[in-house]
Amino acid sequence: MLQGKHILLGVSGGIAAYKTATLASALVKAGAEVRTVMTENATKLISPVVFDNLTGNKTSTDVFDRTYREKVSHIANAAWADLLIIAPATANVIAKLSHGIADDMLTTTTLACTCKKLIAPAMNTHMYENPVTQDNIEMLKKYGFEVIEPDSGFLACGTSGKGRMVEPEDLLEVIKHFVPCKKDLAGKRVLVTAGPTREALDPVRFLTNHSSGKMGYALAQAADVRGAQVTLVTGKTNLTPPPFVKVIEVESAAEMFDAVTSHAAECDIIIKAAAVADYRPANVSSEKIKKGADGSDMTAIPLERTKDILAYLGEHKKEGQILVGFAMETENLIENAKQKLEKKNLDMICANSLRNPDAGFDTATNVLTLLKKDGAKELPVMTKREAADKILDEICY
């Protein structure tokens, strides 16, 4: 997604500048070309040499640097950038930018930028909450800046509160959302399901499966980046929901059925990546089930079928709506997936085998075969994020 994109990374003099090195590294690993612009104060906290080595490009710190690659470096950097992010953005830099002051390399370059501009404030809580700073932030929003609201927590100054810069991995996702790229899903409403369901046996125990939710979350993120309005219906996972996505958390198959069916009619594309339980305990105890008085264990749990969400969606699919399912199998992968494709009235099914060590539950990669009524396409081993884009490519084209 970031392959070949030009990201201009601004660093001002906040203690969080050390985190920005991690962001620079992540951007390069994601395929972006990165140039860094630093204030003089920032160089006292972290050396420009760090960014030189991480990005492979000389860091800009001085408007009048005669050894820089271009004659007018701040103008050249501004014209080069597809996106600018300033992280951390101190109260001082925010104040300057909101009033058009350009007295160093960072503010001068920013003033010349016509690309999308993001700022990630980082400062003491009282500085951040000061009405002057808040007014300056609102002014930047008015001028088209995207402000990445800081987190709350323990700060370097020893206080605790709002003002901590968002973590690099989260900043990377925000950059992916705003970086210029194909928006072939613009105007589309996409619903994605992810994760496992839990079917209660008693207040302590439940039946579930090994789904991590990674594939569904990757699909939601990929659809968002491509311009869609995304709703993610998710079971319990350890994942951080992607930004800019509407998230509906559920637990049981019944809750997922209600959440999905209540939103399905308004969606153009539905992708069912969740691992929904086919069965649930027929009787749910209101108290923890104890061993028998004679010490014997429960040897049987009566089960009943849950509602088939995918079958319901296939039966009620509106004209023009695209419905995509998943099939994880341990045997007869293609045959079973084809049967599910026809039986559930799907437009496409994504089949993978639990026997493949590069696929299956909780892996970082997947190996998919995408089946439609008119044929199949085998995909190689790829990350789940890459696989998500391949799935969306098939939907769009």
Image (tube, rainbow, N blue to C red):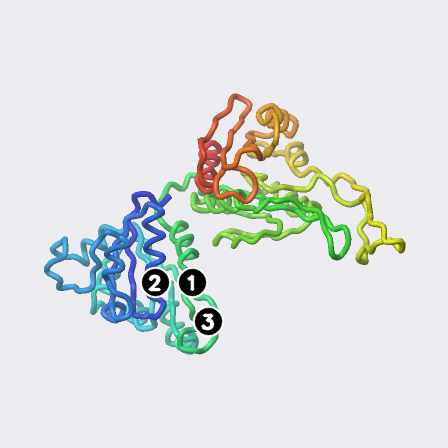
Residue 397 located left or right of residue 103: right
Q: Rounded to the nearest whole Å, what is the CA distance between mark 1 and mark 2?
A: 9 Å
Q: Residues within 10 Å of mark 1 (few under 14, many from 20)?
A: many
- Rendered location of residue 213, percent (x, y): 56, 46
- Rendered location of residue 364, percent (x, y): 48, 43
Name the foreground residue: 15 vs 137.
15
- Rendered location of residue 288, percent (x, y): 79, 57
Give the structural element (helix, strand or loop) at label 2. strand
Instruction: Identify the image quadrant of residue 122.
Output: bottom left
Q: Is residue 187 visible?
A: no
**Would you name the residue on which mark 3 appears?**
162
Give the structural element (helix, strand or loop) at label 3. strand
On-image quarter of the N terminus: top left
Q: Residue, x 29% and y 58% (percent of image)?
A: 9
Q: Is residue 313 above or below residue 178?
A: above
Amino acid at the residue labelled 3: Lys
**Would you name the residue on which mark 2 appears?**
87
**Would you name the residue on which mark 1 appears?**
166
On-image quarter of the C terminus: top left
Amino acid at the residue labelled 1: Val
- Rendered location of residue 49, percent (x, y): 23, 60
Give the structural element (helix, strand or loop) at label 1. loop
For the residues bearing labels 1 and 2, Cβ distance under 8 angstroms: yes
Q: Residue, x 62% and y 34% (percent of image)?
A: 317
